[in-house]
Amino acid sequence: MQLLLFKSKCIHVFLFSFIGAHTLGKRMTSLMSPALCHNVQRNACVMPYVPFHVEPRNIVGDDPQERVSAEAAILNSRVHYYSRLTASSDRLLSPPNHVIPRQEEIYIYSPLGTAFKVTGSDPSSKNPSIITIFAIWNTMMGTSILSIPWGIKQAGFTLGILILIFTGLLMLYCCYIVLKSPKAINMDTSDWEFPDVCSFYFGKFGKWSSLFFSMVSLIGAMVVYWVLMSNFLYNTGQFIYNYAHNVNGSDSEFGTNGSVICPYPTTEPGGNSTISTLYISGNDTSDGSSFEHWWSKTNTIPLYLIVLLLPLLCFRSAAFFARFTFLGTISVVYLIVLVTIKAVHLGFHLEFHWFDTARLYVPEFRLLFPQFTGVLTLAFFIHNCIVTLMKNNKHQENNVRDLSVAYLLVGLTYLYVGVLIFAAFPSPPLSKDCIEPNFLDNFPTSDVLVFVARAFLLFQMITVYPLLGYLVRVQMMGQIFGNHYPSFLHVLVLNILIVGAGVLMAKFYPNIGSIIRFSGATCGLALVFVFPALIHMISLRRQGLLRWPSAIFHSFLILLGMANLLAQFFM
């Protein structure tokens, strides 16, 4: 029989059992914080009445494991006696609020007489600001970082930098609205998420629409993961094959001393393609060997991944894969180091053409910039989980500051990678339009540093992919069936649909830049622009604080989100 023991600063002790505390209800979880001592004189507490009072001599020492005396055991029997005097629904004998222990003063006692301090939701166990900031940074960093150089190329170097800064500030403000939205509701919202806020303001429509757009972001990320895993697995296998058979892969790839390649030079919009001799296809074979036939980036590799990943998606729990989330931070740090080394090795190759188009350079301002805004909407997207992340912040008064610093770090990381890759891309002899949606594709298979990056990212994505599938299953199955795992058949059908979408995209349209921009613009329309802006305006109106400038600005945000999505279909 486990016991809870409360030891106040006045060295008084309040003891009650789990059985006797069942009448506390939510009062126990709230852990009232008012002072328990009514009068304090000369470091002594005068308590007019404390139920089940235990003298301090019943606790020995302040060690992590303390002993319980015989009197505490007698008190346990007394608590059991009182717990049997009334039904669980009768709150007559429930302790008053002023004697409910604070979280940091609760101990759990075992029948063996050892005591353990409860630290589960202890305020001291919450994260300091630095941990919260890097948790947001780590959560926001994803596959979008691989497409930032491509996005800058699509928008133009100067316009791309301006758009990245502007979009980051806009996403930060919308995230701030999401963060403070539960506080404007006059009820207990301590365990609410943003979909709960949407459901409160818009009813079932808000609930199901927020679920739909959350699914768009998650499934879009899983599709991008499948395309990238196919890419990384193909290049990793190609590197191992070439090394084992002493094949120099750079001999068949055009580049600058084998360091940079231009796989698909004909992708320049407007039909102004570069020299056709630069063309290299990852699936073309010159000797028709059986290895090239069975090891194809689009024909076979996406199917091989099914054997590995489909069983992992059917796991009932994702706890095992959650242990590898730290790999995300390591992979991003390695990418930053890799980009720095490549930039130092290649040097900068920039020419500014403001109004004219050059053969090997792109203009500073291009009409394709909405492609970059779509990518950035997903790159800065954390709005559906920011409330949860900030709940663990130790100093809640610093939430806005910590969120702003986290967005600053994310923006600087994107700027660093995007600007260095774009500036260091060797032009001439190659065109800036050769920069791929996955900038690692611009490096040959034989590059050892890039091989390490691909292999590491492949392992990280294999561990993260089941986590994303678990989130999709929990949200979708929980809302539809009221059970996160209704049956193996239900879960299998859902996983087959998700995997099938990834396989089809990896085979017929393996362009992660377009997948990211469409999924980012779609989920961003609702969860970044429309819902936060509407909720903010409704909340201000109910308080009588809505003014015309605020209404016009937040209506403009909604129009921006709609324009961002519509523009993706015309690029």
Image: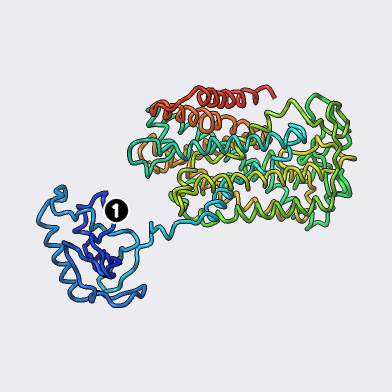
Q: Residue at x 25, y 69 (%)?
A: 44
- Does residue 523 sit above or below 323 in this rendering? above
Question: Disc 1 residue type?
Answer: Met
Name the foreground residue: 171 vs 402. 402
Q: How many marks?
A: 1
Whole-percent x and y of residue 485? 40, 43
Q: Quadrant of the C terminus?
A: top right
Residue under label 1: 32
Residue 448 in percent (x, y) is at 77, 56
Whether residue 117 sits left or right of residue 69 in the image: it is right
Residue drawn at (20%, 54%), measured in percent from left and top? 96
Identify the residue at horizontal 86%, vertical 28% (top origin). 357
Kindly state the secondary structure of the residue where label 1 is placed: loop
The x and y percentages for residue 411 are 65, 43
Residue depicted at 72% across the width and 46% down the height: 417
Closer to the camera in the image, 179 or 449: 179
User: x%, y% of residue 2?
Assistant: 25, 65
In the rendered image, the vertical position of residue 204 relative to residue 180, given as above or below? above
On the image, which quarter does residue 173 sit in? top right
Q: Quadrant of residue 436?
A: top right
Rendered image coloring scheme: rainbow
Image quarter hosting the N terminus: bottom left
